[in-house]
Amino acid sequence: MTDAPDPRRNFYGRRHGKALKPAQRRYLDEDLPRLSLGPLGERFDPRAVFGPRPVWLEVGFGGGEHLVHQAGRNPDIGLIGAEPFVNGIAMCLGKIRRAGVGNIRLHPGDVRDLMDALPDASIARAFLLYPDPWPKARHHRRRFVTPEHLWPLHRVLAPGAAFRVATDIDDYVRQALEEVPLAGFERVDHPLDRPWEDWLSTRYEQKALREGRRPNYLTFLRAP
């Protein structure tokens, strides 16, 4: 695992949840060393891992179901998942093992550290799916859809690359619609309630639906 995060920059809360199951501990011991990007250093070039293929980035992959789904659908794409939550990493490793996909690598830490190390225009698509909503107004600055996260994302995305956002929090939608275009993105005009054709509903979305909250799907393109 990575060193302790800088609390001034992270957009997530806790890093540990309930105790891991024995199989999950085994995934961390056996599979994470092979699938982790490892120490990033000042610069990390994804071509060193994936070669010339396009690379997609999922910011906070939760339990990994969407990440693994996209990897299976797109074997010619390299996918990087960034997630600081240990339990989510363990769950994702289990899904990767069961699916047998080989085009995923994980950054078990803060995505900002990864974005700092990535070259300009090195990512062909990015996903932000059901991020921590930080519902209290004084915490809104910790949301991902703020300039300190969006401008680094803009730098690492290739011109024209899609940035997909899914959330069940109406105020998060409001902030995304306000902040993301200011960071050099153009919104794709489509209904907020229409999921993408290749969408896989995540466990967080299923929880939102059970609790009566409406999913929203936004797509932005990185402007030239």
Image (cartoon, rainbow, N blue to C red):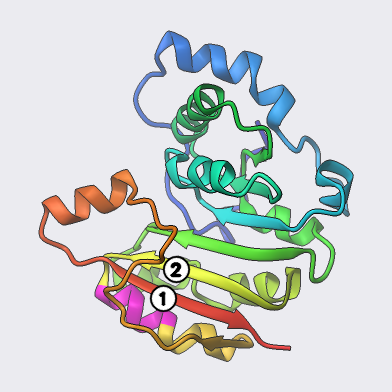
Question: Measured from the top left, where is residue 152 in percent x and y?
Answer: 69, 71
Span highlighted in magenta in the image: 170-176
Tell me the number on the disc at residue 165. Answer: 2
Please name the residue shown 66% across and 58% down the image: 112
Mark 2 or mark 1, which has the lower sequence index?
2
Amino acid carrying label 1: it is Leu
The residue located at (86%, 46%) in the rendering is 41
Q: Is residue 142 above or below residue 81?
A: below
Residue ID at (69%, 51%): 77
| Quadrant of the snapshot with the C terminus | bottom right
Residue 44 shows in this picture:
no
Quadrant of the drawing holding the N terminus = top right
Q: Name the residue located 52 percent from the left edge and 45 percent from the top edge.
A: 67
Where does the image place residue 114, in percent across and percent down from the top left? 72, 53
Amino acid bearing label 2: Val
> Residue 8 at x, y = what percent?
57, 60
Quote the CA–CA distance across marks 2 and 1: 5 Å
Q: Position of residue 35 (x, y in %)?
A: 69, 30
Q: Determine the main secondary structure of the stretch shown in magenta.
A: helix
Mark 2 touches mark 1? (CB < 8 Å): yes
In the depicted structure, whether residue 23 falls above or below residue 205:
above
Residue closer to the observer: 207 or 201: 201
The residue singled out by tag 1 in the image is: 218
